[in-house]
Image (cartoon, rainbow, N blue to C red):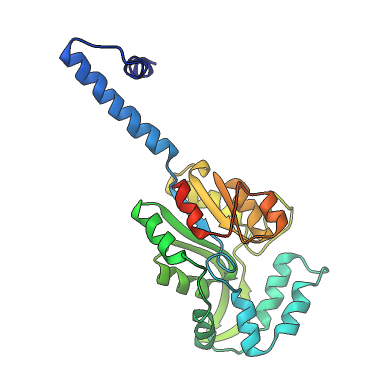
Amino acid sequence: MRVEYVFGIFDFGVFVKNKKSYYYIYLFKLLKDYLEDDMNKIKLVLFDMDGTLLKERGIFEIAKKKKFVKKLEVLINDKNLDFHERSIEIAKLSRGLDKNDLLKIFRKITLNDNVEYVIKEIKKKGIYTAIVTDSYLFLAEDLKNRLDIDYVFANNLIIDNNIITGEIKIHNKELKRDFYSGEIYSICKSCVLEDLCKKLNINTNDTIAIGDGKVDIGMLKKAGIGIAFNAAVEVQKNADIVTSDMKKILEYI
């Protein structure tokens, strides 16, 4: 309370004749500015990968090249399977494929406009970055390294001697339900946000999450600022910001 009182005196411009008193009030003002800046500062930005950092979706580009698009579409639209079960079945479509072949396909997917610039600007400010995706870990890690992102969270496609086995260890091991939709996704993105904030000792209000799909909504709603990027209407309705310009993020950091 005493500190707030001194701030109040300074802010209202009370003239202090005593130079020593003025000096101390000036120091308190600097401290106040620092604390306010720290309170308002974003400390972590979480990105979805497919459709957000990347223009296309990795599994679809792989399916096109490896000719299993129809099988993929059947599984995606199978209402008899929960979302995490679909991920398990979709992983089987890549059985026998070479990891390096998939990486070559993945690396040809174009980044969305200004992604590299935005991430560089974010990192200049000392803000943590993370990829949170329901895609595969070895693909997401490749993108993480290319963009110099700090953390990555994804499903682990099992690979043996560079050959994909068709098995997968989903990130959402405990099968937690999404707090927004109640669905069980292969990765609980809002859970990732909360866990990473605990690890970094960050308040969830000091985060930005950006994504385009229904699986991202929980993460967008948990974050201090949720940004729907090139997103479907349902995602837009649950976001704080709606945009098709990646540079929009820079207005909030």
Q: Is residue 206 left or right of residue 222?
A: left
Q: Is residue 38 above or below residue 26?
A: below
Q: Is residue 88 above or below residue 162?
A: above
Measuring 62% from the left and 47% from the top, which residue is drawn there?
221
Q: Is residue 244 visible?
A: yes
- How many numbered marks have been drawn onto this rendered protein structure? 0
Image spot of residue 156 (x, y percent) = 56, 72
Which residue is situated farthest in the left direction here? 19
Which residue is situated farthest in the right direction here? 80
Image spot of residue 167 (x, y percent) = 63, 78
**Would you identify the image quadrant in which residue 4 lies?**
top left
Measuring 17% from the left and 15% from the top, which residue is drawn there?
20
Image spot of residue 204 (x, y percent) = 52, 44
Q: Is residue 140 above or below residue 218?
A: below
Q: Nearer the viewer, residue 92 or 50?
A: 50
Q: Quadrant of the N terminus?
A: top left
Image spot of residue 130 (x, y percent) = 48, 59
Q: Is residue 177 visible?
A: no
Measuring 65% from the left and 64% from the top, which residue is drawn there?
186
